[in-house]
Amino acid sequence: MRKKQYLVLIIVLIIVVAALLAVIFGKRAQTRKAEEEAEAAIEYVNAFETGDVTAFSYDYYGETVSFELQDDLWICTADTTMEIDEEEVESFLSDISGMEADTVIEDVEDADQYGISEPSQILTVEFSDGSSLTYTFGIENDMVGGYYLQVSDDADGDGSGTVYLVDSTIVTSTLSREAESFQVEEESTESAE
């Protein structure tokens, strides 16, 4: 009789453990699927491989900030003696490559209504295959926050094409850096007494 009770308990225990495992793995699968759907829903402006970039430039208060990759090292074209922090450049390029569009406006007939003809900022990125992209930032949308942007790949020659609305920090932070902000920081040395 006891053997039957133990056998029933073991069977019930196995069923409970199997049900728990099914719930746990089912939740993980649902979470993974939700994350994949959320990632697929993100509209990137123009993702690129940062390792393919050979040069970039943008405007900083009327002066052009320009960097080139020479012999696998980044140099500031305005001051070739400046020691560049490679991680800062990589972080900058990752921010640009990972730029997400809050809104995508397709088949725009006149991009001038978004300030594209009188840009607030222009960023040019050049690649190892000889191609380049120009990011033209138009006016800021104060209502929803963000800047309108058109990328040369998405623009037709007549001022039409696709316009994106992107987070304003791209213009106000990422592209508001002077060349020296890419410089290797000198560590202060304190004399030990």
Image (cartoon, rainbow, N blue to C red):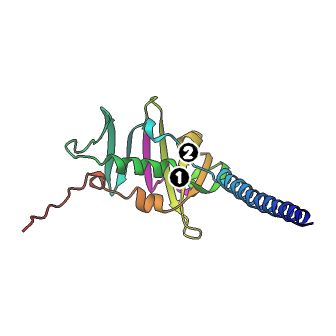
Q: Residue furthest front?
A: 1
Q: Is residue 86 left or right of residue 50?
A: left
Residue 155: in sight, yes or no?
no
Q: Residues within 10 Å of mark 2 (few under 14, many from 20)?
A: some
Q: Given contact means CB atoms under 8 Å apart, are the residues at marks 2 and 1 in contact?
A: yes
Asked if 79 appears above or below 193 in the picture, the reply is above
Q: Residue furthest top?
A: 129
Q: Position of residue 145 (x, y in %)?
A: 55, 67
SS state under label 1? loop
Amino acid beneath label 2: Asn
- Viewer-side residue, 118 vs 72: 72
Q: Is residue 166 left or right of residue 75?
A: right
> Is residue 157 a member of the stretch shown in magenta?
no
The quadrant of the image that shows the C terminus is bottom left
Q: Position of residue 112 (x, y in %)?
A: 56, 53
| Residue drawn at 41 percent across, 51 percent down | 91
The residue pinned by badge 2 equals 46
Instruction: Tell me where residue 127 sits by quadrant.
Output: top left
Work out how far the residue at label 2 is from the one at label 1, CA to CA, in angstroms: 7 Å
- Viewer-side residue, 75 vs 152: 75
Name which of mark 2 and mark 1 comes first in the sequence. 2
The residue pinned by badge 1 equals 99
Q: Residues within 10 Å of mark 1 (few under 14, many from 20)?
A: some
Q: Is residue 115 left or right of residue 108?
A: left
> Is residue 117 a member of the stretch shown in magenta?
yes
- Report the magenta residues as a range: 114-125
